[in-house]
Amino acid sequence: MPSLEESFEDLKQQIKYARRLSNTGDDPVYYLIFQPAQMIEVKRQMKIWTARLMKEGWNVHTLSLAEVVNAFLKNAPLRDVWLAAEKENPLDFESINTTLREALLYDDVVTKKVLDSRSILMGNLSANL
């Protein structure tokens, strides 16, 4: 598996060259994918990567899928029900994961947040032209 720095540079190149090839005016969404064990290192590197991109002239916006999921789960209407069920069977990880996964998929939380964020950014871009 490539290092975080290699993954970041690869992502940067994908974005850079995809913009040249796009004739629709729509920018695709790209993801920096890493192992969960690398989360702390990614958080450390984000400020460095963001500063580097801004220095290179990029308009940087980040969206953490972990933060999106966490915000949804903290504010979900069924949160109290889920917590009560977990107390009854705290080691039933399969059931807990299934319940949370279904809630995220049913509400299409991640897709909506990505599209909402993209729409806001595109609106800001249009307003600045």
Image: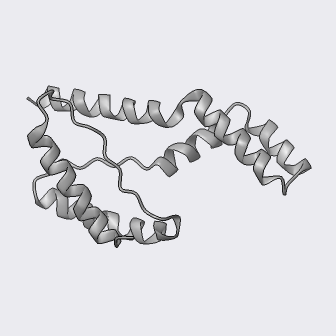
Q: Quadrant of residue 105?
A: top right
Which residue: 34% across, 69% down?
4
Which residue: 51% across, 51% down?
66
- Residue 123 position, x and y percent, is 23, 27
Which residue: 21% across, 56% down?
12
- Name the outermost residue toward the right: 88
User: From the viewer's perspective, is residue 120 above or below residue 59?
Assistant: above
Q: Is residue 53 left or right of residue 103?
A: left
Q: Is residue 64 left or right of residue 107?
A: left
Tell which of 99 and 44 is nearer to you: 99
- Residue 78 position, x and y percent, is 74, 33
Number of marks in picture = 0
User: From the viewer's perspective, is residue 48 above or below residue 21?
Assistant: below
Which residue: 45% across, 30% down?
112
- Residue 117 position, x and y percent, is 35, 35
Q: Quadrant of the N terminus?
A: bottom left
